[in-house]
Structure formats: C-alpha cells, structure tokens
Image (cartoon, rainbow, N blue to C red):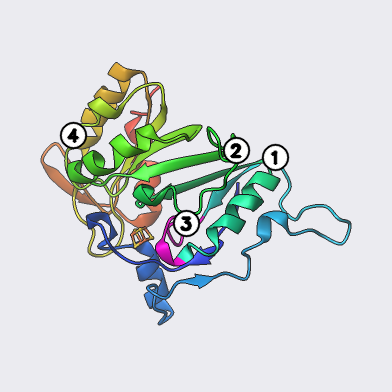
Amino acid sequence: MADWNPWHGCKKFSPGCAHCYVYRRDARYELDAAQVKKNAAFDLPVRKRRDDRYVLQGPDTVWTCFTSDFFLDQADPWRPQAWAMMRERSDLDFFFITKRILRFQEGLPPDWGEGYPNVSIGVTCENQAMADLRLPFFLSLPIRKKLIICEPMLENIDFSSYLGPEIQQVVVGGESGPDSRLMRYEWALAVREQCISHGVHFQFRQTGARFEKDGRVYYIPRVQQIAQARKAGIQWP
Ligand code: SF4
C-alpha cells in the first residue's frame, strides 16, 4: 500500500475531531495543524523516474489524504488537479475517508459520471447525529465504492437504515491518545449484527486506548490496539 498526502492540515468541525491525531502529531513538532498547506508530494501519483516509469507502480492501493480532509474548503483550488491525477492513474486504487461528504460536489470533475472505478470513499460517522446527517446524502451520490468508517466510535449507533449492497464495509474502532474517549465492546457487536443482517462486511479495526468490555475498562497501548481488536475475532465474514 502506498501513501499520498496532497495537502496537510485541517480544521476541527465535528465531535470526532476533538482529539484529532493530526493535531497531536503536529503539536509534538510545535506545528499548527490548522495551517493547511499543499505538500511537496502533491503530484506524487504522476511523478516519474528518469526511465519514464511512474514512481508509484500499479497495481496498488493508495491511502490518500490522511493528514487532512479531501473535501476541506481550503483545498478547493487544488482538488481538481488531485482528481485529474487519480483519473490518469487508473492502475492505482485511491482510498480516502472524509467527514465533509456534504462538500462532495465542490470541484468534482465533469467526467466523474457514476464515479471513477479506482476511487473508494469512506464517510466517517462518530455518533448517531453525524450518521443521520451524512449517510443519506452519501448514499445518494455516484461513487463506485462506499464505506462507512466509525472511528472514533463515541456511542452506540444504529446504521440499519443505511446498510445495503451499496456499502462495501463498515469499520468501527476506538479513539487513541492520552485524552481518548471510551469505546464499548457492545457497540461494536451491535454494529456487527446490523451488518450481518444486511449482508455488509464488518471490521473491528482497533480498540482505541480506553476500551470497556463486560463492565471492565482497559487501557490499551497504541501498539496493541489493532492486535487486540483482531483477537476479538468478530470480523465478518
Ligand atoms: S476532519 Fe479529520 S483530519 Fe480534519 S480535524 Fe477532523 S479528525 Fe482531524
């Protein structure tokens, strides 16, 4: 899997943003994550070596824009070019997650049609209110591959009315960092049941740092959060 961060920095605007890892990481280097900047690697997908081959070789999945939000308003001038690079690199699969799906139409390329086949979009829903706000619109959009990302999961959420063949997968997980909010195992199990009854793939990706199971709260170090979630063995199918 390759990484591509066309721009860096973001603005907090949603409950899930409270302890954003981009802010935490930048603070370590005394940087202000609210300053949005186009990165030097902006053109990475179309950058070529001396032998005229692309730097990023396909086929591969490109984890895109993970220190910002692809639909951030400050990135409006850069997004058309980013779309054009994804269109050019049809041998790569681009995947990004966003909390700003309501801005999907801003800078959308005229040839988008039913969606570029090599672009997957995950919409983040950290609580019921954000799910009810974002998912009806998300479902109405022409996007070939859609995922629901519930990280950090802040409460029990009923996704039932949004699940169906259009959704490829629901991913749930907790929050990391020193101020992390609690995630309960029973919330993950409830979403899993919703996914099974609608035939949608389910992944419990990571526990977060504060995790409650059977009435007991566990403090889980960052390096063990993914492994602990895997151990639960509740991925479906
Ligand atoms: S949208 Fe994502 S990157 Fe932006 S502040 Fe919120 S959590 Fe951080």
Tell me if I can see residue 187 in this picture: yes
Tell me if I can see residue 170 in this picture: no
List the residue tagged with mark 3: 66
Name the amino acid type tagged 3. Phe
How far is mark 4 from mark 3, CA to CA?
28 Å
Task: Name the spot of residue 25 as percent of width and height, x first.
Answer: 40, 69
Name the amino acid type tagged 1. Asp
How far is mark 1 from mark 3, CA to CA?
21 Å
List the residue tagged with mark 4: 186
Q: Residue at x 51, y 32 (%)?
A: 144
- Mark 4, other Cα within 10 Å: few <14 / some 14–19 / many ≥20: few
Q: Above or below — where is 22 with respect to 224?
A: below
- Mark 2, other Cα within 10 Å: few <14 / some 14–19 / many ≥20: some
**Which element carries disc 1, helix, strand or loop?**
loop
- Front: mark 4 or 3: 3
Q: Residue at x 67, y 54 (%)?
A: 45
Name the amino acid type tagged 2. Asn
- Front: mark 3 or 2: 2
List the residue tagged with mark 2: 118
What stretch of residues is rendered in magenta? 65-74
Q: Are marks 1 and 2 in contact (CB under 8 Å)?
A: yes
Q: Are marks 4 and 2 in contact (CB under 8 Å)?
A: no
Is disc 3's CB within 8 Å of ligand 1? yes
